[in-house]
Amino acid sequence: MGLFGSKENPEDMKHDAMSMMERNQPKAAVSIYNKILKQNATDTDALLNKGLALNQMRKYSDSITCFDKLLEINPNDAQALNNKGIAMAENGNIQAASECYDEAIVADPKYAASYFNKGVLLDKLQEHELALTVLEKAISVDSRKPNAMVYRGIVLGKMKRHEEALNCFQNVCKKYPNNQDAFFQKGVQLAELGRHEKALDVFDEILKKYKDNVNVIYAKSRSKAALKNYPEALELLKQAVSRNPKVIRNWAKDEPIFTVLHNDDKFRALVKL
């Protein structure tokens, strides 16, 4: 130790903070980043990663403050703009979030995450055609990641373009065989197209690994009902309701496939019809 002591090494602290993030301990990471920023308030890496950790903790207002400090130093930091947009959206400030994503795209037209988040935002605003355009741009900028491809398929499904959506998910499954989201959505689209036997093959395969997944159990119940296997459909629906009563009951009440069961005492008791 030196005669007058020494500060902790910022690079070592950054390594420790990243380790905390990898262990899903963002609060501990923020504490370390605060020590780094106490030594150097303009450390852009620490500001960015502290903001990311705060977003993970859902402390969105604090993360916006953090990103703003970074953007005072570097107004064209696309990652900071993008993640500030995420925080803005979570805080309900949709217009500001959209502007952040646009600014991030201008700052770095090859940063795919900004296009993806803009597409998700447009989808939530029911701007499905615009969402597709932006998601397709995200895919063209970075075709190595499946998230924009999967979300594009989801949007196509919402637009009732089920054949296109199915084709999209099939392509993702070929390219990323372990992507369970795409595989599940493939089953959903098969069901939407009335191909329930094939949909059930998908759901059964997923349930071998994730036997308690409520969304898959509900989807399987729906397909069983479509095939008029009502006893099994009701048993599966019972399992789904036990795991997430409020959501599943609302889904079941609004599901046209279950209309035939509206006079069934077991169904009525399950969904409190």
Image (spheres, rainbow, N blue to C red):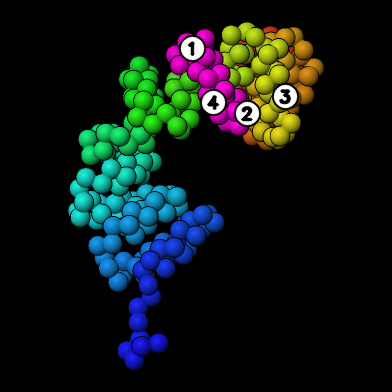
Calculate the distance from the C-alpha at mark 3 to the C-alpha at mark 2.
Answer: 12 Å
> Disc 4 designates what residue?
175
| Of residues 56 and 261, the one drawn nearer to the viewer in this rendering | 56
Residue 157 sits above or below residue 64 on the image: above
User: For the stretch drawn in magenta, what is the main secondary structure?
Assistant: helix
Quadrant of residue 257 within the rendered picture? top right
Question: Residue 172 appears at what percent x and percent y?
Answer: 53, 24
Instruction: Note whether residue 262 is visible.
Output: no
Residue furthest to the right: 231
Estimate how packed mark 2 is, as few (under 14), some (14 to 19) or many (20 or more) residues with alpha carbons within 10 Å: some
Q: Find residue 164 and name its label.
A: 1
Q: Position of residue 25 (x, y in %)?
A: 51, 58
Q: Nearer the viewer, mark 4 or mark 3?
A: 4
Q: Nearer the viewer, mark 4 or mark 1?
A: 4
User: Which dot, 4 or 2, sits closer to the camera?
Assistant: 4
Q: Residue at x 46, y 33 (%)?
A: 145
Gap in angstroms between the C-alphas marked 1 and 3: 23 Å
Q: Give, as a three-letter code, the residue at label 4.
A: Lys
Residue 142 visible to the viewer: yes
Instruction: Identify the residue under disc 3.
Output: 204
Query: Reading the chain from its start, which is encountered first: label 3 or label 2?
Result: 3
Upstream in sequence: badge 4 or badge 3:
4
Answer yes or no: do the residues labelled 4 and 3 have beta carbons within 8 Å? no
Name the side, left or right, on which 208 lies relative to 79.
right
Q: Is residue 126 above or below residue 247?
A: above
